[in-house]
Image (spheres, grey):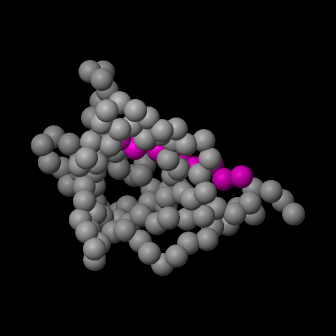
Amino acid sequence: MGCSRSVSKEDLDHLNGYWEIAKVTFPDGNTKEYTVNTSVDFIMLEDLKGYRKKMQPNLTGTYRTSDDAEAFTIKEEGGALWINYKSELSEWSERLERLEQNAFSVTNEEGIRYDYKRFQPISIKQ
């Protein structure tokens, strides 16, 4: 991937919004594609601090969610941007590999890469 540009702090506003997982790539090269998702992630970021929530979209264009949210901070380290999560139960980090308006990718500490695409809601009028 010699041609890919690194993610800059100026790109971080793209993280805000609704995302669905598109593909997971494991360290051994195996992949899992996601064509249908029953939940999406809502990400809100401001001043390098934010949270991520799981949401269940409804066909009416609304969402169901719980009060659970994963708080995170973003830090620059070793020339890369890292999303650092901390909850009551654990801490973990993901390296931000790619970030565009409609797609982003992260790699976790186990070497698993998650590719996300911007969620496009389906609304059925009643």
Percent coordinates x, y for residue 53 in the rendering = 46, 66
Picture quarter with the C terminus: bottom right
Query: Splitting the image into 4 quarters, where does residue 124 fall?
Result: bottom right
Picture quarter with the N terminus: top left
Percent coordinates x, y for residue 45 in the rendering = 37, 61
Residue 48 or 82: which is nearer the viewer?
82
Query: Splitting the image into 4 quarters, where does residue 83 fall?
Result: bottom left
Residue 101 or 36: which is nearer the viewer?
36
47 in the magenta segment: no
x 56%, y 72%: residue: 65
Percent coordinates x, y for residue 88 in the rendering = 28, 77
Position above or below: 73 against 106: below
x 84%, y 59%: residue: 125
Q: Is residue 118 visible?
A: yes
Which residue of the protein is positioned furthest toward the top in this rendering?
A: 2
Along the horizontal axis of the image, is 93 left or right of 65? left
Percent coordinates x, y for residue 35 in the rendering = 60, 41
Which residue of the protein is positioned furthest toward the left in this rendering?
A: 78
Q: Is residue 101 visible?
A: no
118 in the magenta segment: yes
Q: Which residues fall within the magenta stretch? A: 113-122
Along the horizontal axis of the image, is 89 left or right of 123? left
Q: Main secondary structure of the magenta part?
A: strand
x 55%, y 65%: residue: 55
x 39%, y 37%: residue: 25
